[in-house]
């Protein structure tokens, strides 16, 4: 025991020295790496071919290289012209010849540079387009895999329920039979919703998504949708609140489509909410030429439209669906309206990520716009407008 203790005492200082040495070495390496990074960064700034290498262009496709070569050729021509003319003609003629050659070479150099620059830019644009197409292809493949999974799973569930119902003993139990039939009915409804979403996306891509608008009471429609989520909210201990403007004017919209938008927003508000959270639905009046963000009471709303459309937005009813959930990062605020995009969360993925894409297309078909405001960890607010 004593011997072991002595040996351990001897090894402690050595180990400490090793730790100190390795720390110093690590710090040294960090300094060296940092210096190397600085050198690379500095070289990138002064290297005229860096951008060409980055874009994957060869030297003879690189505008910077062509510019240097034509510059060398121009200087050589000027020097040659001066030497030749100064020997055989007067100084005045030599100077005029030099000026003429300079002008011609500069014009040629400019034309060559512009031509090569145009080719280089076209190639870079083509490469970027190819990257984008590959990314979209990957998204489509992932989406198809999701669709296959989302359709296969419920079909398997229906098949299993059918097999169970073949048992006479289970069929004699009315409660079990009824529960299974309800489960099958819910599963079939989910499949129909998914198929409807897919068909809507196809219509959006083909530009033939149409809405049949009628003048009606928006408040009544919003209340009906809100009530349909009441039971689900109670199960999750989430409070549903409403804040509607009294005597809201009747407006033109398609009831089924606006219900579809509200269903998508309320489904997400419950899905991504916290325990004992809150979901609020309210209506606001926007008057033409007024600041829409001041009217909503939130200055950080990101509207998914261009500045001109936002400034010229006609008088509208704004519907807001807000929650006290997990929130969305600033970088994801506009991405969530892209096809098949889903926010990375701790929640299990449900659906194919088409809800917001379809919603924004439906609102735009009504002549409105959508917006979103969110703070990570505090919740999100989704807005849509319908013209009065």
Image (tube, rainbow, N blue to C red):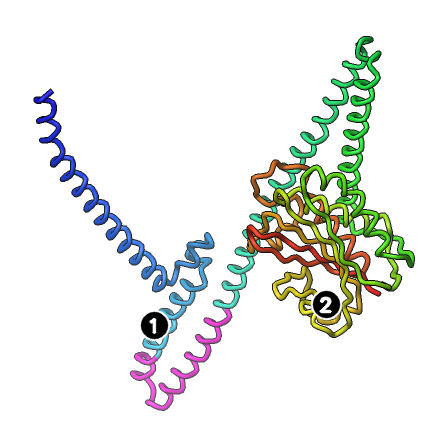
Disc 1 versus disc 2: nearer the observer: 2
Q: Is residue 177 left or right of residue 69?
A: right
> Which residue is disc 2 drawn over?
309
CA separation in Å, label 1 and label 2: 57 Å
Q: Quadrant of the C terminus?
A: bottom right
Q: Position of residue 363 (x, y in %)?
A: 77, 56
Q: Quadrant of the N terminus?
A: top left
Q: Position of residue 280 (x, y in %)?
A: 71, 53
The residue at 38%/65% (across/down) is: 69
- Look at the image and say whether residue 31 sits in the magenta stretch: no
Q: Give the mark, 1 or 2, whose residue is nearer the N terminus.
A: 1
- Callout 2: SS: helix
Which is more toward the observer, 235 or 292? 235
Q: Is residue 48 left or right of residue 180?
A: left
Which is more toward the observer, 90 or 385? 385
The overriding secondary structure of the stretch rendered in magenta is helix
Whether 271 is drawn above or below 71: the answer is above
Q: Position of residue 258 (x, y in %)?
A: 81, 51
The residue at 26%/55% (across/down) is: 35
Q: Give the residues in magenta.
A: 82-111
Q: Position of residue 166 (x, y in %)?
A: 81, 11
Whether 372 is drawn above or below 325: the answer is below
Which is more toward the observer, 344 or 199? 344
- Callout 1: SS: helix
> Which residue is disc 1 drawn over?
76
Q: Is residue 285 left or right of residue 333?
A: right
Specify few, some or many for label 2: CA neighbours under 10 Å numbering under 14, 14-19, or 20 or more.
Answer: few
In the figure, residue 214 lies in which quadrant? bottom right
């Amino acid at each position: 025991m004593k011997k072991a203790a002595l040996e351990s005492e001897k090894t402690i200082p050595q180990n400490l020295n090793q730790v100190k040495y390795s720390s110093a070495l690590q710090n040294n390496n960090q300094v060296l790496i940092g210096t190397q990074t600085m050198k690379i960064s500095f070289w990138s700034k002064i290297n005229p071919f860096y951008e060409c290498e980055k874009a994957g262009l060869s030297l003879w496709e690189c505008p910077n290289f062509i510019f240097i070569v034509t510059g060398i050729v121009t200087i050589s021509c000027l020097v040659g012209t001066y030497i030749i003319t100064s020997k055989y003609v007067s100084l005045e003629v030599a100077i005029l010849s030099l000026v003429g050659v300079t002008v011609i070479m500069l014009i040629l150099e400019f034309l060559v540079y512009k031509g090569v620059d145009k080719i280089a830019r076209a190639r870079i644009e083509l490469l970027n387009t190819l990257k984008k197409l590959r990314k979209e292809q990957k998204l489509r493949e992932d989406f198809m895999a999701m669709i296959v999974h989302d359709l296969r799973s419920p079909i398997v569930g229906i098949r299993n329920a059918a097999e169970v119902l073949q048992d006479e003993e289970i069929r004699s139990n009315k409660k079990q039979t009824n529960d299974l039939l309800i489960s099958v009915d819910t599963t079939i409804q989910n499949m129909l919703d998914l198929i409807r979403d897919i068909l809507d996306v196809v219509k959006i891509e083909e530009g033939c998504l149409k809405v049949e608008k009628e003048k009606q009471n928006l408040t009544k429609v919003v209340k009906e949708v809100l009530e349909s989520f009441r039971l689900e909210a109670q199960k999750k201990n989430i409070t549903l609140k409403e804040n509607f403007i009294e005597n809201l004017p009747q407006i033109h919209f398609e009831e089924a489509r606006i219900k579809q938008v509200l269903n998508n927003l309320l489904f997400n508000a419950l899905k991504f909410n916290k325990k004992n959270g809150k979901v609020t639905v309210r209506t606001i009046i926007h008057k033409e030429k007024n600041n829409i963000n001041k009217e909503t009471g939130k200055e950080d709303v990101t509207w998914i439209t261009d500045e001109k459309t936002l400034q010229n937005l006609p008088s509208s009813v704004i519907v807001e669906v807000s929650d006290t959930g997990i929130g969305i990062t600033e970088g994801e605020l506009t991405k969530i309206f892209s096809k098949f995009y889903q926010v990375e969360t701790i929640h299990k993925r449900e659906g194919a990520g088409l809800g917001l894409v379809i919603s924004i297309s439906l609102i735009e078909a009504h002549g409105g716009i959508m917006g979103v405001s969110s703070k990570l960890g505090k919740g999100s607010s989704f807005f849509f407008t319908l013209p009065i």
